[in-house]
Image (spheres, rainbow, N blue to C red):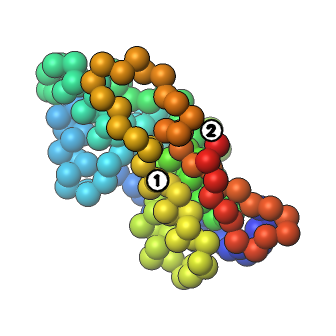
Amino acid sequence: MQGRHVVGTKISEVMTTRPRAVEPQTSVREAARLMESEDVGSLPVVQDGARLVGVVTDRDIAVRVVGRGLDAEGTTVADIASRDVVTLTPDDDLDDALALMARAQVRRLPVVARDDELVGVVSQADVARSDVKEKHVGEVVEAISQPPRGPRVTGDTGSEPDSTRRDELRYDDDQEEPRIEPR
């Protein structure tokens, strides 16, 4: 992508600093309350005050707690949080972040500095509020939000036909704008 589209814009220019985070021992109920009060669908999980160790999402709560019939007060964030987290650094380019969001199908990414210290979060909303008014930003945001195609009815075997896979954002060297194509 070579920074052609959002030339020189760094994550540090658009990210939210001092994001709300939870610790591993936080109850799922408290995490859900924080998500509601902060109007977010995910929270970074930090240990020792700032070291990012995971992310908990509203989907984690729905699937891993409610779906399994677990007690939200007795279940901790550590029990359900995703530990394999995609992150950015403050010096990463916004172009790369947007493409990464589209590929990973996420609306928020934690921003970390040395030793996985959480220093911010960048979200679709941060990008929308920024001075970046490039047409492709809207296309990337749309790619992030693309739902899978076709229904998945109870009783499906879990394998997805090719037509249900997520779309992927592609840049060609001779193209000014990205194109979205099925993977």
Picture layout, residue 30 above or below residue 18: above
| Residue displayed at 62% across by 58% down | 180
Q: Nearer the viewer, residue 58 or 88?
A: 58
Image: 115 above or below 182? above
Task: Name which of mark 1 and mark 2 comes first in the sequence.
Answer: 2
Residue occupying the point 34% across, 25% down: 80
Question: Mark 1, residues whose alpha carbon is within 10 Å: few (<14), some, or many (≥20)?
Answer: some
Is 9 positioned to the left or the right of 110 in the image? right
Badge 2 element: helix
> Mark 2: few, some, or many residues within 10 Å (few <14, many ≥20)?
few
Is residue 141 toward the left or the right of residue 96 in the image? left
Foreground tag (1 vs 2): 1
Point 70% across, 71% down: residue = 177
Mark 1 lies on residue: 146
Residue 1 is left or right of residue 158, and the answer is right
- Looking at the rendered structure, the number of numbered marks drawn on it comes to 2
* Kind of residue at badge 2: Asp
Question: Residue 140, image x and y in percent?
Answer: 56, 63
Marks 2 and 1: in contact by CB < 8 Å?
no
| Badge number at residue 161 | none
Q: State the quadrant of the N terminus.
A: bottom right
Residue type at numbered disc 1: Gln
Classify residue 98 by image quadrant: bottom right
State whether residue 104 is above or below residue 54: below
Q: Residue furthest right?
A: 174
Residue 23 visible at all: no
Above or below for 131 versus 162: below
Q: From mark 1 to mark 2, how far is it between C-alphas?
A: 33 Å
Q: Percent x, y for residue 15?
A: 51, 64
Q: Where residue 115 is drawn, which disc sits there?
A: 2
